Every structure is written in structure tokens, then in C-alpha cells.
Amino acid sequence: MTDFNINLTQAPIGARLPRFLQTTQAPTGGGPTYAQDQLNVTPAGGAGVDPTQIQQQLQSQNPADRFRAVVAITNLPPAQAIPLLQMAAQNDNAQVRDLANQALGVMQRMPGATQPATNQPQPTQPQYQPTQPQYQAPAYTPSQAAPVPQFQMPQGQAIAADDVAFMLQMLQTDLSGPNSTQAVQQLGSIAQQHPQHKEAVLNLLLNHVYNTRDSSMPTAIQVLAAMGDQRALPYIEHVYRSTGYAPEVYPVALQAIQAMRGAGAQPGTASVAQNLATPEYIRILELEMKSGGAKGLAAFEQIRATLGADPRAQSPIRQEVLRVMLTHIASSSDGTVAPACALLGAMGTREMDTLRYLDAVRRDPGKGPEANRAAEAAIKQILAMPR
């Protein structure tokens, strides 16, 4: 199964990592259990682990078996584990290779790593030939991770607490006049100087953002993002999806959405926690993906990251991701169509007539040969999965 930008320290199919490879972050969600994913490896403890049996499991056609076999190897003494890990590091599955290399680095520093194991069979190179079609995504380099956008409150003149009520009334009038930008800045300053009036400032700014399209919009969005109140998020998303705003408004709105969603501008990383990724956020990324090029690929990677390590796992945003991918492969012909087809294959879904959409891409020469091959590989991958 082809995957994109996977957090390799998280077991993809519910497997538990050995203690020395576990991270401090808990997984965002477990994947479903599949009958073909069962693995007969003795639980942690070391005494019941059979190195010969592990060699056989490393040659399994199921990547989950190979991944769990590597986990089982870590229960062996270093002298026994290192040759097996070296063999696993040559595996054709990226997750298996990375986990094996991590474990190998730890084992080689442990006492006894250089002692030869007695009566240890020498591992043989696995001769695994995958039966499932293997599709490699188009070669590209993800953008460098950018810092999470930061928004600072504007610094305005100091206002006495007794004057705040009067100033709010005056600024409410100014918001609809030629000095709207200065009024927005002063509201942000009041929210910072007098936190007890944040609710009043928030209401004024939300009404302003929803009903206005003047030059104060970028400043208003920045102030709302700096306040960090999640109630402002739907309003900013509305701005981003609407027409009629000045061009400079949309980049600011997108940065505010990313900052408030907790995702940051980090394409290609699983930085969007599943409890923060919502259908609204996926729709924002859908608009970005339609732009194509490096920007479209970066948006695709962020959408892929919302599915977690296992694209087959159920999650609240799975159906929205499926809709976005199907709509995209049907309406686009750029370099994002091939990875979108591959993701549909990795998701293993037949919902929403996925196979027919993929078949249409497979037969459409206008999509390009890369997309045609990706669609055909995805169809075969889905058909090979148990229903």
C-alpha cells in the first residue's frame, strides 16, 4: 500500500512500539482491525520469540506483519536482534525500513551488541515479491516547514478603564467610516489592555468582518487571530471562501485559519491532529489544492496528514477527504491527480462510486500517463482488499 508523509514513529495498524521507541505523544486514533493483519508473535518478554519464525514473518506479503515482526525483534538480546534488524532495514516497505533503522541504532549502542550469538541462524535476504501493484507518487520535494503564523495585537494609546464604554460606542461608529482601520487597531488595543471587555470587542469585530469588505479587513482578521477565540474561526473561513474582498485579504485569512486550527503552515507533516481537522478545514485546503503546482501538492499533503498513519482508519473527516479527492480527480488534470488517485487506493474505499471515478481517470488520456497508471494501480489495490 502506498502512503504519503507518514509519521514513522506511530504504528500504522495498531501495533505497539517498543518502549525505547515510543514518543511522548499519544496516537490520535487507532486503525481498524483486519483479519489479514493478524500476526502470531509472542508478546513482549523475549523468551518466546523465535528468530527463525521472525525471518519468515519479515517475508510476509502483509506490510503490517512485517512491521510487527520488527517490533518483536526488539524483544531479543542485541546480538540476536541486530542481524534481523539489518535484514529488516532492506525491506521494500518504507515504514518497516524506518522502524528497523531506528531500532538498529538503539540496539547497536546497547551492552552485548558486539557479542556473537550462539547457535543463531544467519538471516537470509528476503525474496519477497509483492502481489499488489506498487505505485510510486510523482517525485517532488515538499516545502520546508514554516513557523506557525503569529499575530500580535496592535499597540494603541492607553485608555482608562472608566473610558472604555464610551470608546467602544465611538469606535462602533468609526468602523463604518473612513477611519475603520484605525478603529480596528484601537479595538485590539482595548482587548489587550482591558481583558474584561474582550467579549464586546469580539462581537464588534465579528459583525465588522461579516458585513464589510473595506480596506480594514486584513487588520480585523489579524486582531481576531491574535485574540485566539475559536468562535471567530467560522467567520474567517467565510471570508476566505467568499468573493469580493481585496486580494491581500485571502493570504491573511488563510494564515489565521492555519494558526487557529493549530496546524501551522507545515505542508508534508502530520501536524493536523484529528480532533482539530474539521470538514471546514478540509474545504479550505481543497481550494488550495485546486491551485495546482507546489502549492497544490502542499495542500494535498496536509489533507493526507489529517487521515493519520493508516489511511484506512475511520475518522470524522474521512468522508470529507474522500469527497475532496473524488471531486479533484474528476475536475483537475495537473500533477496532484496522480497522488490523489494513489491516496484513494490506499484508503481502500468503494464508497461514492470510487472505482468508477478511478476508471474514468484511467481511460482519460487528458489526465496524463502518470495519472492513468496511478488510477489503474489504485483500482487493483482496492479490488484486492477484503470487503
Image (tube, grey):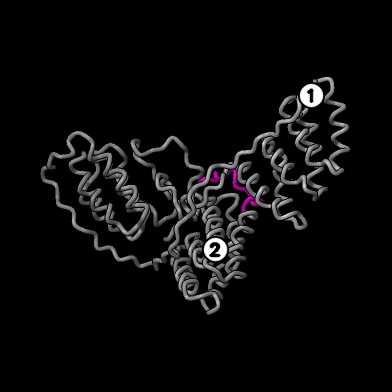
Which quadrant of the structure image shows residue 207? top right
Percent coordinates x, y for residue 23 in the rendering: 41, 37
Count neighbours of disc 1 (C-alpha within 10 A) and say few if under 14, some if 14 to 19, many if 20 or more: some
Percent coordinates x, y for residue 24 in the rendering: 44, 35
- Residue type for callout 1: Ile
Residue assigned mark 2: 293
Q: Which residues are magenta?
A: 271-282
- Vertical placement of residue 314 versus 158, above or below: below
Q: Is residue 278 part of the magenta span, yes or no?
A: yes
- Residue type for callout 2: Gly
* Circles 2 and 1 in contact, beta carbons < 8 Å: no
> Horizontal placement of 91 versus 254: left or right?
left
Main secondary structure found in the magenta portion: loop
Q: What residue sits 53% from the left and 79% below the top? A: 365
Nearer the observer: mark 2 or 1; the answer is 1
Disc 2 to disc 1, C-alpha distance:
49 Å
Residue 159, disc: 1
Q: Is residue 239 part of the magenta span, yes or no?
A: no
Of labels 2 and 1, earlier in sequence is: 1
Count neighbours of disc 2 (C-alpha within 10 A) and say few if under 14, some if 14 to 19, many if 20 or more: few
Percent coordinates x, y for residue 347 in the rendering: 50, 59
Task: Describe the element under mark 1 as helix, strand or loop.
Answer: loop
Which quadrant of the structure image shows residue 354? bottom right
Q: Pick the residue in front: 295 or 360.
A: 295
Percent coordinates x, y for residue 272 in the rendering: 55, 46
> Horizontal placement of 267 versus 176: left or right?
left
Residue 368, disc: none
Task: Describe the element under mark 2 as helix, strand or loop.
Answer: helix
Q: What residue sits 39% from the left and 42% below the top? A: 16
Q: Pick the residue in front: 292 or 176.
A: 176
Q: What residue sits 20% from the left and 51% below the top? A: 52
